Amino acid sequence: MNPIVKVENLDRVFDVSKPWLNRVIERQPKQFLKAVSDVSFEIERNSVYALVGESGSGKSTIGKIVVGLLGKSGGSVEINGVDLETETDRAKVDAVRADIQMIFQDPFASLNPRWRVRDIIAEPVAALGGNTDGLAERLLEQVGLSAADASKYPHEFSGGQRQRICIARALASEPKMIVCDEPTSALDVSVQSQVLNLMSDLREEFGLTYLFISHDLTVVHHMADKIGVLYLGRLVEEAPRDVLFASPKHPYTQMLFDAAPRMDGFGREVEPPKGEIPDAINPPSGCAFHPRCPLATDLCKQKQPQMRKHGDTRVACHMVE
Amino acid sequence: METPILSVRNLVVEIPTRHGILRPVDNVSYDIHAGEILGVVGESGAGKSMTGNAVIGLLNRPAHIKSGEILLSGQPIHSLSGDALRRLRGKRMGMIFQDPLTSLNPLLTVGEQLTETIMEHLDVSYAQALDRAVAALDEVGIPAARARINSYPHEFSGGMRQRVVIALALCAEPELVIADEPTTALDVSVQAQIIALLKRLCRERGVAVMLVTHDMGVIAEAADRVAVMYAGRLAELGPVRDVILNADHPYTAGLMASTPLASQGQKRLRQIPGSMPRLGQLPMGCAFSPRCEFAQDKCKQDPGPTRETCNGRAACWFPLSSTAKQEATQ
């Protein structure tokens, strides 16, 4: 079966230079931040692919590139075999755009406060000239709100209810794929479980595929089928969920798992990880993780490890045998 | 038994508004002993931060302490004047806020902020204060402390800034530290470092720590006892292991069951229906009763007493642990 999303050697560079006059006066060259470099992965239909990583690891940037909110600097992203940036057939582009939707992190910032819920939810369909009669009411009931809420404004809802509205909006154009960028990190635990359960139900009902972006390992463990771990813009490990959690191979993944607080870790005393995520403008040479890595050798300092297959896992580390 | 460092008795905080009086903290009591970490958990709006602010005297008008007592090592501090409280704050009570960037002054170097605090509260010369400041930075794990003491806050990373805030809270050697969501703005690996640091300082110095957070994992690993808050009231208080594994209050039990656990696999999460009521629209009886699966008529009329259970204390008519249940039926 061909994958719904195919990302190959994706690069994204941001220009973070100072204004030109400052550069002239301070004699500084242009500065570039490589947010994503050489990332390749595929998402199978009807599965949940999760991207995890700490802040600055490029996970949100990849999500935005996949839906087309950000351009890319190199590589290719194909959705259903169509590359949105190079495709010239307008009909194909429109079809793919309707097929892919996004849920954002902050339900307070991602709903227009001056629009009624009905208009917010119908927008993805209305923008493509579709029929929106009764659409919002039907979707609201599907996400656990009432049809009467359609004529209210976003401020009348709580955080969890707003996130349900965002989900209803994402479902409006009957997409096949939804990119979820930290959909529950702004919510309280008891509301988070409601939203996660809703997302699992909708996935079964509509045969959806999720690209799930999160920093919370327990949530990722709960939702994902396959997980990609990012560090400083690079994919360092990718594996099916059970394989990854049972035997993380990359030292960074192991460090992340050890550091995550556990509900059953009463009085757990662990040696906390050393150091912090380095500066992305001047990343370390070779493997970006080597300054913090307990296994690092000279090779790691010089040569960037490539992704290699180890059973079901793909891992980018010189030391994994 | 020795006097607890912090003792909060029947604390009530009120905010008068046009639509009536709100009670963000309602009849809350707890103790923290020396060398103990008390975790305070709850959802947003449950009153966790408000309790911390009331203790340290940082309530913003019109919020004020309506009744109840706050005792610091046995000495009442809830009725102290602003000036007297100012002398206690920093010296006997330290505070660590959530966002390390906004709790440091961006225009002063880290050294200036530390020495200012030390000289305000301890009778030392500038040179001694500077030495103490370097030692404080050293203790919280900032490399090359003497060189970095002249840096400004923006020159530090998020994790290092939070270390500076901790150094600032601890530099006058307080008895009590209130940490309000100290790791929420940080990444997982840095969070682990900060929690390990807090635990070490608490153990070595015998400081009493009130750790306010919404992350149950952090509580499980760091706290000795937990207080669970719901809609301004203390739902349950007890040793961390008992509260997490065998909750007495249905709200705590629901909270634990709705947290995804690695050991459960992808089983459907249990969910608590609805969301926490707003303070202006609290139900008459137990605030949790509209969402509670065990609620009965009694719960809807009377909030019920806070009673001793085998775990500790729970504010529920029908606590879940078996012995307490028998008492309730008798």
Image (spheres, helix red, strand yellow):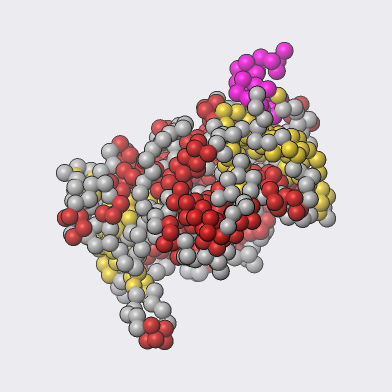
Q: Residue at x 55, y 26 (%)?
A: B242
User: In the figure, residue B310 lies in which quadrant?
Assistant: top right
Above or below, A246 against B328 in this view is below
Above or below, B268 against A30 in this view is above
Direction from residue B312 to residue A64 in the image, left or right: left
Q: Residue at x 64, y 67 (%)?
A: A114
Looking at the rendered image, the quarter that the C terminus of chain A falls into is: top left
Direction from residue B323 to residue B159 in the image, left or right: left
Q: Residue at x 68, y 22 (%)?
A: B308
Q: Residue at x 69, y 39 (%)?
A: B72
Q: Is residue B68 magenta?
A: no
Q: Which residues are magenta?
A: B308-330
In this orientation, which residue lies closer to the viewer: A293 or B235?
A293
**Outermost top residue:** B330
In this orientation, which residue lies closer to the viewer: B2 or A184?
B2
Above or below, A98 against B317 in this view is below
What percent of the width, then of the height, locates residue B193?
A: 43, 46
Q: How many marks?
A: 0
In this orientation, which residue lies closer to the viewer: A141 or B309?
B309
User: In the figure, residue A258 lies in which quadrant?
Assistant: top left
| Residue B291 appears in the rendering | no
What percent of the width, then of the height, locates residue B116?
A: 59, 59
Above or below, A38 against A206 in this view is below
What percent of the width, then of the height, locates residue A99?
A: 40, 60
Direction from residue B236 to residue B244 in the image, left or right: left
| Residue B9 appears in the rendering | yes
What percent of the width, then of the height, locates residue A121?
A: 56, 60
